[in-house]
Amino acid sequence: MSTREQVPSDIVGLVRRARLSRRRFMTASAAAAAGYTLAAGPVRANPIVTASTGLDTGTAQVQTTEGDMPVYFAKPAGVANPPVVLVAMEVFGLHEYIKDVTRRLAKLGAFAIAPDYYFRQGDLTKITEIQKLMPLVNSKADAELIADLDATVAWAKTQGGDISRLGIMGFCRGGRTVWVYCAANRSVKAGVSFYGSLVDPDTQKSLWPKSPIELAPYMKAPVLGLYGEADQGIPPAQVETMKAALAAAGKTAEFKIYPGAPHGFHADYRPSYNADAARDAWEQMHAWFKRWSVLP
């Protein structure tokens, strides 16, 4: 059985790593002190850091049926009723990269919220080996995931967020979450999936009843898919299949495949980072959210 058949496709690219020069990366202790995950491999010495100047940022607890879920949020200071954008994280937990992305979205005018919907599985940022991490994240049922996102949206409303302008974006497994949530919640105005898996392993059917491709007819919001041509787990042919399924169902979606870009090309803390693709993808996301009246 091939690697693609054994593990979710959004993870294949994470387990194949090239040889790297140590001089270009932080020590493990420095990376941990800076708040980055270690399970993803070495952390680049110069990841993007977004200041909180002009923002209200912090952590909060969102009530769910099984306890309080931690969230990290950032929003423009002094702005009433900002639009709400959910940040669906990778499999590595609520670490510094996801927090930084949340601040970047706030700089664009969003009340951006990153929920730690793996909180029942523990603090994933403390796990250093991907082999120990994957059984935990793969145990997350879609029904529970959707309920956690719904709870986050409800909390955002109590904090003054304008949920009539609701968007969601995410990376890797969080990119898959974008597809799932856009099929589940008709209140979402637009979604952006960064290299989210499109075909799930058959072994996950009890927890993930339908893969994103199977959910294509149920999409309730327009989605922008941003993928890498060199993604070893999500080949361009699979993206084209998703594109065709959405078109056949009469759903609005657009895709961009970046030549030579690997899985995780936006993750500026990882060796997979592709600056040109990441920059353009962020601009594409911004334009997409403006087009669908999520962002001003």
Image (tube, helix red, strand yellow):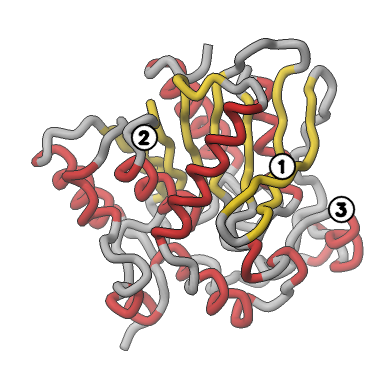
N-term-proximal mark, 3 vs 1: 3
Q: Determine the residue positioned at 73% across, 64% down.
A: 125
Percent position of residue 101, x then y: 66, 38
Q: Is residue 137 left or right of residue 115?
A: left
Q: Are marks 3 and 1 in contact (CB under 8 Å)?
A: no
The reply to whether residue 107 is visible in this rendering is yes
- Give how far apart the Cα atoms at labels 3 and 1 are: 16 Å
Q: Determine the residue positioned at 34% across, 66% down.
A: 208
Figure quadrant of the N terminus: bottom left
Q: Residue beneath label 3, please?
A: 34
Q: Determine the residue positioned at 54% across, 74% down.
A: 15
Q: Determine the residue positioned at 43% across, 51% down.
A: 146
Q: Residue beneath label 2, please?
A: 224
User: Judging from the image, what secondary structure is the residue with disc 2 in?
Assistant: strand
Q: Nearer the viewer, residue 140 or 35?
A: 140
Name the quadrant containing residue 51. top right
User: Judging from the image, what secondary structure is the residue with disc 1 in?
Assistant: strand
The reply to whether residue 20 is visible in this rendering is no
Disc 2 residue type?
Leu
Q: Residue beneath label 1, please?
A: 72
Q: Is residue 97 left or right of residue 255?
A: right
User: Judging from the image, what secondary structure is the residue with disc 3 in?
Assistant: loop
- Give how far apart the Cα atoms at labels 2 and 3 are: 31 Å
Percent position of residue 47, x then y: 76, 45
N-term-proximal mark, 2 vs 3: 3
Residue 105 - label = none
Classify 10 Å Cα crowding around label 3: few (below 14), some (14-19), many (20 and above): few
Q: Is residue 29 left or right of residue 16?
A: right
Q: Classify 97 as above or below 29.
A: above
Q: Classify 220 as above or below 90.
A: above
Classify 10 Å Cα crowding around label 1: few (below 14), some (14-19), many (20 and above): many
Disc 3 residue type?
Ala
